[in-house]
Amino acid sequence: MTGLSDIRIIAVEQYGAGPFGSLHLAELGADVIKIEDARTGGDIGRHVPPFAEDDDSLFFQSFNRNKRSICLDLSVPAGVAVLHRLVEGADALMYNLRGDVPDKLGLRYADLSHLNPRLVVCSLSGYGMTGPRRAEPAYDYVVQGLAAWMDLTGDPAGPPTKSGLSLVDYCGGVVAAMSLLAGIHVARRDGVGGECDVSLFDTAMAMLSYPATWFLTRGHETRRKTRSAHPSVVPFGAYPTADGWLMLACVKPVFFERLTKVLGVAEVAADPRFATLAGRQAHQADLDAVLDSALSRHGTDHWVGLLSAAGVPCGPVNGLREAFEEPQAAQRGLVVDTEHPSFGTVRHVRTAGRAWWENPAPDRAPGLGEHREQILREELGMSAAELADLARGGAFGGER
């Protein structure tokens, strides 16, 4: 037994947020049983282009490695009966459903605790299980707009801009996974489970962090700045070089002093306008002009080499190709391979969770309903006749 291999999670999940959260748990060793609805072709992620075929896609593969799949129709009693059998032996039930749906499907802790009092039920919804938006569907980009992320992102002269990645989904999934593990810890300690109520909206609002504190305490509204600059620390942002862009992060005075020496403008650090953080913020345009002029003399790699050697936090603005060519990515083993019957060798970026145990070997995401026999017959001991009766009752929803 290693890692989280003693934890079984039933996941009624689809698309991004829920699967991303349970992916981290699966790659740390947990047994994640994914419940899909065959009537709609399973998890909608199976059909996301551009690389989608035969109820599978590279999008789906990226979110669902090391999981197992069963198809159930939870709108009929037979499907619910199978779910109840699974719940009896599980540590947690995890789902990313609209806030009002779990009540309709009987998936709340109050509905299931008689089957397994130690069960942890973790809901990851758009807006939570309470509040006026509870019954509304939500997606990452919508929540980015609602929670002020888009207003804080992009160039001041441009439109509100979303993050380049679905960070609300990803962070919501991680918060749900963390909450679920905390719930399992408490349930094992106290002998009684309960419910975790995580939402994308709560996650996005919580991540406003210090700009929220500035606003709530002093009424200060953080505004967008050019070139991805930090709202208060200068220099901290993207600067053009002779052949690209360089990110600088001079959070501490010593970093600024080192920067000016490397660039050959050491006198700038002593200039009264730039001698303090407040001064550099007040005269940012003047300072940026000096730094731009100096950096334009050489390319990004030249400056990264010199600045890194001097201990100045910096890095190139990479594209995907350059990011995966970084020696650090190779040394950390960030790329893993799985074998797929249609896509061949699929290369993934691994999840970031690491611990002292050896995690399971990377395995492809499951086919639609692939593990029904393994789980229900071999592990739960259901007979062929029992499965046939359940199928006639619509439990598996016309599984292909």
Image (cartoon, grey):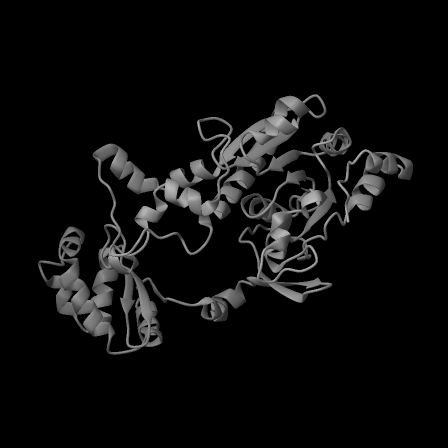
Asked whether residue 258 is in view, the answer is yes
Q: With respect to residue 257, does 142 lie above or below?
A: above
The image quarter in which residue 55 lies:
bottom right
- In the displayed structure, does residue 225 sit left or right of residue 340? left
Q: Residue at x 32, y 67 (%)?
A: 246
- In the displayed structure, does residue 277 sit left or right of residue 185? left
Q: Position of residue 274 (x, y in %)?
A: 14, 59
Can you name the residue that lies furthest to the right here?
385
Asked whether residue 107 is in view, the answer is no
As rendered, which of 390 and 199 lies closer to the eye?
390
**Quadrant of the rendering where the N terminus is positioned:** top right
Q: Position of residue 253 (x, y in %)?
A: 22, 57
- In the displayed structure, does residue 328 sit left or right of residue 180? left
Q: Residue at x 68, y 65 (%)?
A: 343
Q: Residue at x 25, y 38 (%)?
A: 214
Q: With respect to residue 74, does 248 lie above or below?
A: below
Q: With respect to residue 127, does 364 lie above or below?
A: below
Q: Position of residue 395 (x, y in %)?
A: 77, 36
Q: Residue at x 66, y 47 (%)?
A: 29
The image quarter in which residue 76 lies:
top right
Q: Position of residue 398 (x, y in %)?
A: 77, 43
As rendered, which of 157 and 331 lies closer to the eye?
157
- How many numbered badges does the structure rendering display? 0
